[in-house]
Amino acid sequence: MPELPEVETVRRGLNDVTLQQPIEGGDVLLDRTIAHPFSAPNFLAGLQGTAIVQWHRRGKYLLAELIKAEGRRQEAEGRRQEAEGRSSRISALSSRPIAASPSGTYSLLPTPHSLPPHSSGWLGVHLRMTGQLLWVDQTTPLEKHARVRLFFGDGKELRFVDQRTFGQMWWVPPEHEPEQIITGLQQLGPEPFSEEFSVAYFTRQLQRRRPIKNALLDQAIVAGIGNIYADEALFLSGIHPQTLCIHLKQSQIEQLRSNIAQVLQASIEARGTTFRSFRSVAGVNGNYGGSAWVYGRDGDLCRNCETAIERLRMAGRSAHFCPMCQKLKAKG
């Protein structure tokens, strides 16, 4: 499943190509891709005639702020620039933070009362396991697993391609907050680059007898981390994935929190990790996988000590680690 760096890569790409352009129509090729409204025609009707002001990210969700397109391009541009400049004032604002990039930079998700009267709500997307959002010419041959097409001007379209069909899209009417319709947003913990993801918070969340790898995959603890970056952060911290949370020393917790940010930032800079069907909006592969410390390298030699990387199964997922650099200490 695409994780925070992959979704962030897509978000940035979407903001480069889709803003302030009217959505002129669309086509739903697989009805169950649409999570709200349950009628595909109503979904398309809600989007038609709108334009995207800004794409936000929350965990692994993408959220596009919509505005009525007619006569609003200049104002939409002003709102986009304002959103990009809010990062310097984040501590003074009470809006819910939606992470945009590392180093404490955010896009803020406006609440309904702060949206303009001509707001047209939100477009929500979750890529799940194999979803892709591609910005292509409408004349581009249709992919076998294309599920939704949104038509823009100048013969362009935003195409949602999803082989496994687990991905979802939502249109959220302007009178609703995104969390009311996209209920998965309600379950998310803080963003890993946010002030809320503090050492004190992280320490409190780890006072349980469960493996640290499982805790890192819990989106209610921290949003956006998945299998790849949990393995990488644990390696950099010298922590075996089966170590129980309650056995971690305070210094280990602090180091792990720091390394989570480090590996996520490194992957964002590399435009994510290429795995299976992940591509950027332009159809480009990510580059982080080639420099991964342990993920996907079982049988290869550790880049630090040259011990063979091992893999084990935990809660139905793979965990990659170096048995020498990440020794499991026996405790009662």
Image (tube, rainbow, N blue to C red):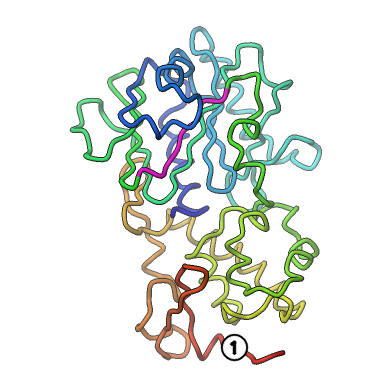
Q: Name the one closer to the observer, 41 or 7.
A: 41
Q: Position of residue 199 (x, y in %)?
A: 76, 65
Q: Quadrant of the rendered structure where residue 281 is?
A: top left
Q: Position of residue 319 (x, y in %)?
A: 48, 74
Residues drawn in magenta: 165-172
Q: Is-magenta flag for residue 69?
A: no
Residue 38 vs 332, above or below: the answer is above
Please, what is the three-letter code of the amino acid marked with disc 1? Answer: Leu
Magenta span dominant secondary structure: strand
Residue shown at the point (75%, 81%) measured from the top left: 249
Classify residue 313 as left or right of residue 200: left
Q: Quadrant of the rendered structure where residue 193 is?
A: bottom right
Label 1 sits on a secondary structure element that is loop
What residue occupies the far top of the structure in this picture? 71
Residue shown at the point (42%, 42%) measured from the top left: 167
Q: Residues within 10 Å of mark 1 (few under 14, many from 20)?
A: some
Q: Which residue is mark 1?
A: 328
Residue 135 vs 317, above or below: the answer is above
- All told, the count of numbered labels is 1
Q: Quadrant of the C terminus?
A: bottom right
Q: Position of residue 318 (x, y in %)?
A: 45, 71
Q: Position of residue 292 (x, y in %)?
A: 43, 71
